[in-house]
Amino acid sequence: MTLPSELPSSDERLATSKRSRTGRLMGVQAVGMGSAVPEHLVRNEDLAALGYDADWIVQRTGIVERRHAPNGMATSDLAVEAAERCIEAAGVDRGQIDLILLGTFTPDLLMPATACLIQDRLGVAAPAIDLQAACASFIFSMITGMQYVATGCSRLALVLGADCTSRVLDPADERTYPLFGDGAGAVLLAAGSDDQGLLSYAVGSDGSGAGLLYRPMGGSREPFTHHSESNGRHYLRMEGRPIFKWVVRMLRETCHEVLEAAEVTLEQVDLFIFHQANLRIINSAVNDMGIDPGRVFNNLQRYGNTSSASIPLALDEAHREGRLHRGDLVLFSGFGGGLTWGTALMRW
């Protein structure tokens, strides 16, 4: 099977908003957050040995540095560290955690679920599963966890986003290698007041763009092999230009859709946290929608694109910097391979 390398034209496909599934999910709150990144710092200047231009990276992406996991460190290690900090910040008994959801596309193993390894190391008795929606994995995981809590099926849900993207990048691919970094973030969800939760959300998928961001090898269609002709096919592949155009349009459409459903204006939103993929993408969307840049939280410059960890890592940092308060309106938006996306407006 050959995956499409570009999206159909706008005349041949539905608008992103028409492909979204929308909803409202109240009575849920976040009671704790935590994050973790590897100590190993990789600056743009450090990539010069691979032939990269540090100034070009900043101009094209806004990224100055990122973190890479050292040999021996896996996605679960970062996730456990983030979870421990989250549990400590929440001040809860870990024995009360009854659900663990991990968003990731770089699991420790293809089987079993990395969430099970996390569950064992945390020493909690809870079902644990992985959710894979590329860089939108955390948004999908958070909405899923909130549904468990809102329906009474979970009292305390641990939702994580974690990825070691450096493990699946080709150092010779100058279009992708400088963009990504490793990290993890965690949020504990519990029942909240009637006015807390998601005032509106929109999630969706468009498989016609699968070939824009994917890993050819490692699945049932093309299992891993040692044959020389398959060298490098286990690495991530990305078509940046069409993704850029799609993301800017998707953000505009879904943000408008979510705000309209919640009867909230852009000016009423206290904090915007977009997936930290590329500063040019974020700035284009912000300018396009007329958002006050002072209400947009970015940490891409220091971490690069941490995929599933992007939004929870930013959430934790924004909270520790005093930019997130009870009662605030926070708009999140994640997007990634699939193509997948999720935009949500939350009353904190």
Image: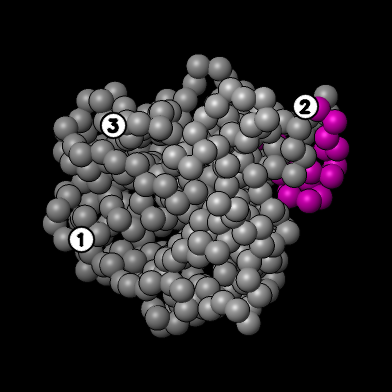
Q: In the rendered structure, find residue 150 and report the number of the disc placed on it.
A: 1
Q: Give the quarter of the figure containing the C terminus.
A: bottom left
The one of 228 and 215 positioned closer to us in this rendering: 228
Q: Residue at x 78, y 45 (%)?
A: 58
The numbered mark, 2 or 3, whose residue comes first in the sequence reads 2
Residue position for label 2: 46
Where residue 107 appears, as percent x and y from the top left, is 43, 34
- The mark total stands at 3
The numbered mark, 1 or 2, whose residue comes first in the sequence reads 2
Q: Residue at x 66, y 49 (%)?
A: 238
Where residue 301 appears, as percent x and y from the top left, is 68, 44
Tell me if I can see residue 322 in this picture.
no
**The residue tagged with tag 2: helix, strand or loop?**
helix
Crowd tier of the residue under label 3, counting other residues whose Cα lies within 10 Å: few below 14, some 14–19, many 20 or above: many
- What is the three-letter code of the residue carrying label 2? Asp
Crowd tier of the residue under label 1, counting other residues whose Cα lies within 10 Å: few below 14, some 14–19, many 20 or above: many
Residues under labels 2 and 3: Cα distance?
Answer: 36 Å
Where residue 167 appears, as percent x and y from the top left, is 57, 29
Residue position for label 3: 116
Q: In the rendered structure, find residue 210 and report the number of the disc placed on it.
A: none
Q: In this picture, which residue range is highlighted in magenta?
A: 50-67
